[in-house]
Image: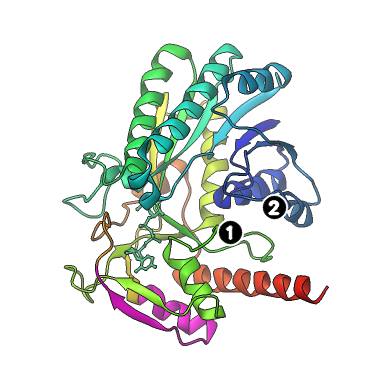
Amino acid sequence: MKILVTGGTGFIGSHTVVELQQKGYEVVIIDNLSTSVKEVLYSIEKITGILPEFHEFDLCNEYLTAKFFDNNKDIKGVIHFAAHKAVGESVEKPLKYYRNNLFSLINIMQCMNEHQIKNLVFSSSCTVYGQATELPVTEKTSIQKAFSPYGHTKQISEEIIECSVKSSGIKATLLRYFNPIGAHETALIGELPIGVPNNLVPFITQTAIGKRENLNVFGNDYNTPDGTCIRDYIHVVDLAKAHIIAFERMFNNLSKSDCEIFNIGTGKGYTVLEAIRSFEKVSGKKLNFKFAKRRQGDIEKVWADTTYANNELGWKAEKDIDDMMLSAWKWEVELSNKVKIRHKA
Ligand code: UFG
């Protein structure tokens, strides 16, 4: 069965492609390589033995998107990751985010409509909850005003999908991810930030390997046990697996509505200092960090109630924070070995 994965060379996309291929699905990827590299395809091939079919273009291009769907009438489902996701950049360049994240979704859904492709898994985010007043957040927790244009695009995307399924016959599953980290156990794929990382874990691993001088811990005066922010970190492979389970539930007509929503996290919150401690334990490295002022746009704390995903989807995160940190560290070491080999050659 052929599945389209948009953004399939990105961090979560590539791990999902691996899981799909290992379950026997035929995968076709569309990615414009704006924040990823083509080499990821060969790493996927190394892991699974299959080089996924790849099309490089921008899904905001209506003509190219329509042409792709015209030529690929056997696609049975779409897993849509392709989107910009840097919270800070979205504050500086909001239109870039609204244009990219919304136009691509609209183009895809229009083509799905035209070609009667019924199943869509959408990459949403716990960012839609904003700073929730009650924790943990359930899927019924009310949506607060978004903290960033990026977060707002996820809220609008969810609404676009919810409205469109009513009139179209498309079924959708919205997966609200918490904080995806870690890397594949083979250390062949992982997170590949371009330039200075925005996110905590790549910054930790790049500091430990010597690429960055020190990590700034943004804020130690929050209302949390050690003053640093709390997040629900989830291993990217656990997250990737949730996509396949969600797709199969829809495909087999087991969904309870045409647009289902699931929180995808572990249900456990860790402070930044606890995350650092876990990294230090599994890597054996002492991390150079200092406290800095709060980062604008950060929420204080969020973690998931995953009961609905656990009971309904039959999915549960298996890996703990130490597994996540160790796999992220192995990936960083692997990346630095590759650079050393390139320099020698
Ligand atoms: N942090 C630091 N130093 C850094 C980077 C991050 O202290 O150099 C802290 C942040 O202040 C925050 C925590 O680490 O408390 C996690 O920050 P990330 O940037 O890794 O993740 P965010 O929670 O800000 O954002 C992530 C994704 C978004 C998604 C959001 C949902 O990047 O795409 O989770 O909460 F929307």
Q: Quadrant of ligand 1?
A: bottom left
* Percent position of residue 328, x then y: 55, 68
Residue plotted at (43% across, 61% down)? 199
Question: Which image quarter holds the C terminus?
Answer: bottom right
Closer-to-camera residue (134/60): 60
Q: Earlier in the sequence, mark 1 or mark 2?
A: 2
Residue plotted at (21% across, 74% down)? 225
Question: Which image quarter holds the N terminus?
Answer: top right
* Percent position of residue 7, x then y: 59, 41
Mark 2: which amino acid?
A: Val
Q: Which residue is mark 1?
A: 192
> Mark 1 and mark 2: span between their CA atoms?
10 Å
- Residue at disc 2, secondary structure: helix
Q: Which residue is mark 2?
A: 40
Q: Quadrant of residue 283?
A: bottom right
Are the residues flagged by discs 1 and 2 in contact, CB closer than 8 Å? yes
Dot 2, crowdedness within 10 Å: few (<14), some or many (≥20)? Answer: some
Mark 1: which amino acid?
A: Leu
Do we see residue 252 in this rendering? no
**Which residues make up the magenta segment?**
274-293
